[in-house]
Image (cartoon, helix red, strand yellow):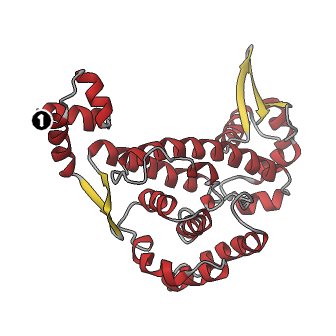
Amino acid sequence: MFETAQKYTDMKYCRKEEVAQDFQMLMIDPIWIEIENYRRLFRWSVPFAKEYYITRNSCVNDRINELTDQLYGISFDHRNEHVVWECDTRILNERQQSTAHQFINQMQIALSGDKEMMLFRFLDQWGIDHSIQRKHFAFFLDDQISIILRIFVALEFFDKVTSYAFVLFLLGSHKMLYPLSFLSISELFDINISSPAEFDLTYKLLLFLDKLRLNLSKQVLSLGRNARDDVRILSKQELLQQYPMLSEHQAGFYVTHNQVDHYYTIRDYMTFAEVCYETARYSLEGIVKQNWYRKQRIGKKFMYYVV
C-alpha cells in the first residue's frame, strides 16, 4: 500500500477520481486513506489560512527549486540590460499604472530600508485596504519561504489588483529579481481547476508552475529582443560603459556593423581594427557571447550575422 501511495503522489499527483479509474473499483476509500496519510507527511499549511495546504514532497519541491533557480538565472543574465517595464493594463487603472513604475524604482534605491513600511505605502498608493491585508505582511516578507510559493499564494488568495501589488513588490524590492518586475501575470490568474471547497492546493500549484515556466520563456524572448534593440542604438562610449568587458575595437566595430539581416566576416574586423586574423576572430567571438551576433560557417568562411 505504501508503494501505491508513493506512485500516486511522487510520480504523479493524482486526484481520487484518477486513482479510482486505474483500479476500476468503487471501493477506493481504503486506498485513498493510505494516500492521504502519506501526503500528510509532507503537508505545508498556508500560514494565514491553515485549512489550505500544499503537499511539499520531493517531486513538488524539486519543481519549485528548479523554477526558482530559473527565475534568478534569467534575472542575473539580464541584470545589466535596460528593461522596458510595462504595466499590465488589463489589471491596473491609470493611477495605479502611473505609480507602479515609480515605486519599483524607489524600492531599488531603498532596498536596505523598512520593507514592511514600503509595502504598506505601496498598498496605500494603490488604494488597497491595507488594514485588512497587513496581517499577511509577515508571510510576504518572509524570505525563508520560496518566492514562488509567495507569488502563488498572492494569486490564489487575493483579488487581481492586490495580487499584482504583492507580486510587483516581491520582485521589485529584491535586488536580484528586479529585472523581472515587469513580469506579466494576467494569464497566471487562469488556474481555477479546483473547487472552492478543495483545501489541497497542490493541484493548482503544479498547474501554476507550468504556466509560470511558459510565461518566463515568453518574457525571456521579449527581453532578448528589447535588449538587442537597445544595444543597437547605443554609442560606442555608452556601449563601453554598460559592457566594460568589451574592448574599444569591439565596441566600435559593433556600433558600425549592426544592421539586421546583414553578415560580417573576420576580414571585415581585421580591416576595421587593423589586427591579425586570430585577434579578429577572438574579438568577434566575444561579441557572439553577448548574443549580438550569430556565427555560421559557409564554405571555408565564418559569417557573423546580427541577431
Residue 25 lies, with reference to residue 181, above or below; the image says: above
Provide the residue designation for mark 1: 2
Taking the spot 83% from the left edge, 41% from the top edge, the residue there is: 274
Give the secondary structure at mark 1. Answer: helix
The amino acid at mark 1 is Phe
Front-most of residues 97 and 66 = 97
Taking the image as shown, residue 144 lies to the left or right of residue 109, namely left
Mark 1 Cα-neighbour bin, 10 Å: few <14, some 14–19, many ≥20: few
Front-most of residues 107 and 269 = 107
Quadrant position of the C terminus in the picture: top right
Taking the image as shown, residue 151 lies to the left or right of residue 221, namely left
Q: In the rendered image, which quarter is residue 63 located in?
A: top left
Residue 250 lies, with reference to residue 148, above or below; the image says: above
Q: Is residue 56 visible?
A: yes
Taking the spot 14% from the left edge, 40% from the top edge, the residue there is: 34
Image x and y of residue 195, in percent:
43, 48
Taking the spot 76% from the left edge, 74% from the top edge, the residue there is: 95
Image x and y of residue 51, in percent:
30, 62
Quadrant position of the N terminus in the picture: top left
Taking the image as shown, residue 8 lies to the left or right of residue 52, namely left
Image x and y of residue 184, in percent:
65, 54
Taking the image as shown, residue 289 lies to the left or right of residue 300, namely left
Image x and y of residue 97, in percent:
74, 69
Front-most of residues 168 and 28 = 28
